[in-house]
Amino acid sequence: MFNIFRSRRLWLLVIVLFLLIFTINYTSKNQSFFSRLESPVITILSPAQKVLSTATAAIKESLGTIPDILALKKQNEELKKQVAELEQYKQKFLEYQKENINLRSLLGLKQRNYQYDLETAEVIGREPGNWFNVILIDKGEESGIKKDMAVITDKGLVGYILSAGKNFSKVILITDNRCSVSAMIERTRDNGILKGTIEPAPMGYIKMVYLPQEANIIKGDTVISSGLGGLIPKGIIIGEVVEAQKETNGLMQYAIVKPEVDFQKLEQVFVIKNHNGSQGGMNP
Amino acid sequence: MRMIAYVLIMCTTVVLQSTVMELFKIRWVKPDLPLVFALCTAMVKGENMGAFMGFINGILEDIVYGKMLGFAALIKFLSGYIQGYITRDIFKGPVFLTMIFTFLGTLIYDIILIFFSLIFGQIRPPWYFFIPIVLPSALSNMLISPLVYMAVVKIEKFFDFYFNVKY
């Protein structure tokens, strides 16, 4: 039996719950209210976040170097071989580039500018929980960063800007199951959508859905961004296919993709401020 | 004054969680220090304080990393309240009891999170992640809980001495 005091407390609990549910609904539709609230809090917390994340990264790096030293000699030999190979590729690439320029000018095609306007940013924080994959970077609107811009590393696609404050931005990673990115299989040019880590993709892997049933996808195929939707520029490496299966309805197939970027070791990222003269748009 | 001190401690744990706790990440899971702090506060101080600490933890997470305001706050508020309510009349002296209650508290938190994620469309097929996320996170939280519980008791004694005891 509840006495008056207990039932008052119960009512208070119910009121708080309803208020929170109302706030969730309101802020999911009205982002400007949320942005006004997040800016001062993140501005206060970000200096401490920056110092601690730099210290954490330094500790992580020093811990990581111990096994690295053991493998250094072998790695050095392999790298020398790779350098020699890459020198050859570089020569070929320069030849092909010249040839390409000549052919394009012959065809009268307008040369496309693949140069991105990049903004370098440091990762200063990560989602505290284990369910979602959002990171905090130390650059925001002051550096020209806006919502929906693509975020990459030298390895490949990281995600896109969820929201941008004055001097910080939230980045949703491609492994977050709330993230959707248009992608294609580089070899076969089949288009699909990357849906984050969802069933049956194991943790850290991404599921690519809506692939045509007849698509000939094999293990090791490279997955790149398709550029559809205008959010992520076309041609950015995302990862490689580790498995392709038919959907249970038999109409489509899906692929499990291993991302190229090591999300556990993200320290520095690049934000693509514009590509081919246009900025990112809404996610499909 | 005591409440302000607790809010500041919670802010510190949230900052530590998103930076230093990355060092304790094993594969995809790391201990949730602010959640364990809220659960231990609930065990020491009761359901009201547990709900308050859960709320502060959640609202900070929402503001800094969330897509919408109130989502984590709602889940952690309820988790703190339930933890405080179910452990209200139980003797929590032995360490293993603290660990078991933290384990159960984390399970309750994850179940509430999955429930509200389905309602607000935040996670796609969430039950799939029960084994890879829920159980390891409950175990990792359980492991750090004796230290956090001890810290909460010490903090309480410190606050009692400085704020309440009059000579």
Image (spheres, coloured by chain):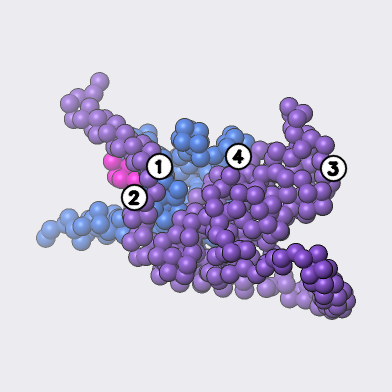
- Which quadrant of the view contains residue A71? bottom right
Residue matched to label 3: A216
Q: The chain shown in purple is which? A: A
Give the alpha-carbon distance from disc 3 to disc 1, as whole Å: 41 Å
Front residue of A21/A16: it is: A21
Classed neighbour count for the residue bearing mark 4: other residues with Cα under 10 Å, few (<14), some (14–19), many (≥20): many
Q: Is residue A179 left or right of residue A185?
A: left
| Residue type at tag 2 | Phe
Classed neighbour count for the residue bearing mark 1: other residues with Cα under 10 Å, few (<14), some (14–19), many (≥20): few
Residue matched to label 1: A29
Residue matched to label 4: B129
- Determine contact: label 3, label 2, CB under 8 Å: no
Residue matched to label 2: A33
Classed neighbour count for the residue bearing mark 2: other residues with Cα under 10 Å, few (<14), some (14–19), many (≥20): few
Q: Position of residue A199 (x, y in %)?
A: 66, 38
The residue range painted magenta reads: B48-55
Q: Is residue B53 magenta?
A: yes
| Residue type at tag 4 | Phe
Q: Is residue B15 left or right of residue B128?
A: left
Count of marks placed on residues: 4
Q: Are marks 1 and 2 on the same chain?
A: yes
